[in-house]
Amino acid sequence: MRAFVLGLCTAMVLVARVADAQMPLPAAKPPDGATLFKQQCAVCHTTNLSEPARQGPPLLKVVGRPAGKVEGFRYSQGLANADFTWDEARLDAWLTNPQAVIPGVVMAYRQGKPETRAAIIAYLKEQH
């Protein structure tokens, strides 16, 4: 009888393990742009014009804004002379490698993960 109970318990454990192995894992939650912005960008940037400027310019309404043109913020020469408007593609290139977009800029941040860049850009688009 003891051997039977032990065998039955072993079989139940194996069935449970097989069932666990076949259950799909929950889908990974996509990165949250607001959280990523706070973690990775808010050290240098705000999205609120009532806060004092930090090391970088405020990013409220950055999508659709001419580069290097926030009133009262002192930009590097390259950004001050930039002749483009921020859009999703330009922001993606900028977050990937700012120096490739405008050589000599001060911003050192680089984000290699496309999904993280996309989430941050989506958040910035909401800031209008």
Image (tube, rainbow, N blue to C red):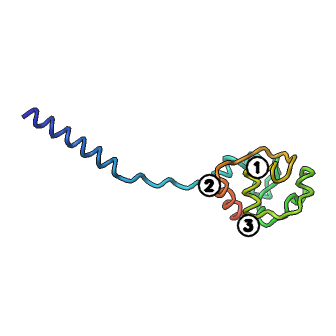
Give the number of the mark in front: 3 or 2: 2
Depth check, front residue: 79 or 127 = 79
As drawn, the label of residue 97 is 1
Identified by mark 1, the residue type is: Asn
Identified by mark 2, the residue type is: Glu
- Judged from this view, the residue extending furthest toward the left is 1
Mark 1: which secondary structure?
loop
Residue at 67%, 50% in the rendered image: 38
As drawn, the label of residue 115 is 2
Lower sequence index among marks 1 and 2: 1
Give the Cα separation between the discs numbered 3 and 1. Answer: 25 Å
Q: Is disc 3 in contact with disc 1, using a CB cutoff of under 8 Å? A: no
Does the rendering let one see residue 97? yes
As drawn, the label of residue 128 is 3
- Judged from this view, the residue extending furthest toward the front is 100
Q: Residue 47's spot in the image, x, y percent? A: 75, 57
Depth check, front residue: 26 or 45 = 26
Local crowd at mark 2 within 10 Å, few (<14), some, or many (≥20)?
some
Give the Cα separation between the discs numbered 3 and 2. Answer: 22 Å
Residue 81 higher or lower than 99, as above or below: below
Local crowd at mark 1 within 10 Å, few (<14), some, or many (≥20)?
some
Q: Is disc 1 in contact with disc 2, using a CB cutoff of under 8 Å? A: no
Give the Cα separation between the discs numbered 1 and 2. Answer: 15 Å
Side (left or right) of 16 relative to 55: left
Lower sequence index among marks 3 and 1: 1
Q: Residue 50's spot in the image, x, y percent? A: 80, 57
Give the number of the mark in front: 3 or 1: 1
Q: Quadrant of residue 120?
A: bottom right
Quadrant where the C terminus sits is bottom right
